[in-house]
Image (cartoon, grey):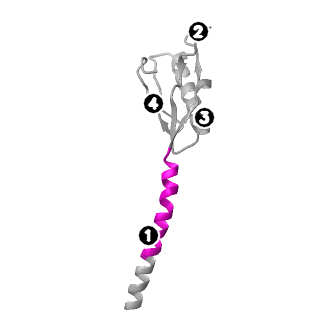
Amino acid sequence: MARASLRIRFLACLIAIAAGLCLPAAADARTTHRCKSADLRYPFEAGGPKTFGVFRLRITGGRCATAHRVAKIWMEKLEASIHGSGPLKVPRSAGGFAFKTLPPTAA
């Protein structure tokens, strides 16, 4: 009986150590990266400044390459809504990620 208790304690210690080793990796995976988004903007009017598109691009738990790919999908959805019939729909998600739409004066 004492031997079984010792095994349980040993396994519990191993699980605690393994969980402790996994924590820093999980914390690193949840960091937020700020990504450049100048290539994701275009002028509102032809020849005007690039004042429309994606600003302040950030991703949590991923890479900037993923953020760019998803932002381009978002832009394609928005452009399809602009060119389609019916009211304008600003996408709230694309590629499995959620987007936050800021007021026009925030950028």
User: Eyeballing the image, is 58 above or below 9?
Assistant: above
- CA gap between label 3 and label 1 equals 38 Å
Residue at x 49% of width, y 38% of height: 97
Magenta segment range?
Answer: 12-31
**What's under tag 4, amino acid-wise?**
Arg
Which of marks 4 and 3 precedes in the sequence? 3
Image coordinates of residue 20 in percent, x first then y, are 46, 64
- CA gap between label 3 and label 4 equals 15 Å
Which of marks 1 and 2 precedes in the sequence? 1
Image coordinates of residue 72 in percent, x first then y, are 59, 29
Packing grade of label 1 (10 A; few <14, some 14-19, many >=20) is few
Most common SS among magenta residues: helix
Residue at x 50% of width, y 45% of height: 31
Are the two marked residues, 2 and 3, in contact with CB atoms closer than 8 angstroms?
A: no
Packing grade of label 2 (10 A; few <14, some 14-19, many >=20) is few
Image coordinates of residue 26 in percent, x first then y, are 49, 54
Which residue carries the number 1 mark?
16
Residue at x 58% of width, y 9% of height: 48
Residue 86 or residue 21, whichever sits in front: 21
Secondary structure under tag 1 reads helix
Q: Which mark is residue 48?
A: 2
Are the two marked residues, 2 and 1, in contact with CB atoms closer than 8 angstroms?
A: no
Which residue carries the number 4 mark?
92
**What's under tag 2, amino acid-wise?**
Gly
Residue 84 visible? The answer is no
Image coordinates of residue 34 in percent, x first then y, are 53, 35
Residue at x 44% of width, y 80% of height: 10
- CA gap between label 2 and label 1 equals 59 Å
72 relative to 30 in the view: left or right: right
Secondary structure under tag 4 reads loop
Residue 106 or residue 67, whichever sits in front: 106
